[in-house]
Image: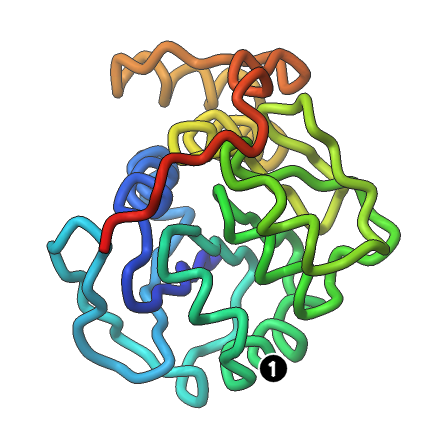
Amino acid sequence: MRLGVVLYPDFELLDAYGPLEMFGCIGPELDILVIGEQAGPAKSSAGPQTLAEYNFDTAPQLDLLLLPGGVGTIAELENEHLLNFLRTRCPTHSINMSVCSGSALFAKAGLLDGLKATSNKMFFSLATSQSDKVQWEEAARWVDAGQYVTSSGVSAGTDMSLAVISRLFGPDKAEEVARFTEYQWHTDADTDPFVQYLNQAPPLPG
C-alpha cells in the first residue's frame, strides 16, 4: 500500500508530520512518498523544509493521499496545477485525507460535493466559502465520508489518521500505534472541544 503526502509552500508542519508519524508505524506494509508541484524542498510555515521526491507528473499511483493545510492554503486555492492534480488523482485512491484547511482545497476542486466534511474551526469559513455543495460539519474532530476523510485543525489530523489506520489495519493496530507513540488518541469524532472558537481566527502573521 502506498501513501502520498502532497506538500506546498507554507504547509503546516503538524498537519503533515502528525499523521505521517502514525502511518510510519505501520511498517513495510505501507510506503510513504512526498509529492510537490516540483520535486525538491517544500518550506513549511514554521520554516523547516521537507524534500518532495516526486512532482505531479512523476508521482506513482497511490492508494492513500494526505493533504495538509496551513497558511499556504490561501495561495494554493488559485493553483490550478494542484487542483487539477487532485481532480485527476483523488478519484483513483482508496482514501483521501485532509487536515485543517486542506479540506478547502478538496472543496475548491469539487471533490467533496454532496459529502460531509469538516475543517479548521478558527478558519472554518475559508473552507465553507469554497463550495456550498458540501455538507459542512461544524462540530466534528474529523468526518469519515468513505473515500474522503477530513479533519479539523492541526492536531486533529493525528486522531483522524489513527481512525483510518483502524479502518484499514484493524482497531488493535491503531491502539498499538497510539501506545507506541505515547499518544492520547481522541477516539470520538463527534467530540470537538474547539467548535466554540468557530471562525474566531487570530490575525495571520505577516
Q: Position of residue 29 (x, y in %)?
A: 41, 47
Residue assigned mark 1:
84
- Whether residue 192 sits left or right of residue 144 in the image: it is left
Q: Secondary structure at mark 1?
A: helix
- 185 up-or-down from 102: above or below: above
Amino acid type at image mark 1: Asn
Observer-nearest of 73 and 83:
73
Give the residue furthest to the bottom: 57
Residue plotted at (48% across, 53% down) = 66
- Does residue 70 sit above or below 84 in this rendering? above
Residue lying at the far left of the rendered structure = 48
Closer to the camera in the image, 26 or 112: 112
Q: How many marks?
A: 1
Q: Residue 96 placed where, x, y %?
A: 60, 54
Residue at 40% x, 87% y is: 58
The image quarter containing residue 34 is bottom left
Residue pictured at 68% horizontal, 22% vertical? 139
Q: Quadrant of the C terminus?
A: bottom left
Front residue of 199/161: it is 199
Q: Is 35 displayed left or right of 171 in the figure?
A: left
What color scheme is it? rainbow
**Picture coordinates of residue 204, whole percent (x, y):** 32, 47
Label 1 neighbourhood size at 10 Å, few (<14), some (14-19), many (20+)?
Answer: few
Residue 127 coordinates in the image, percent (x, y): 62, 50
**Camera-nearest residue between 118 and 128:** 128
Q: In percent of the image, x 32 and y 79: which residue is there? A: 54
Left or right, 110 with respect to 204, comes to right
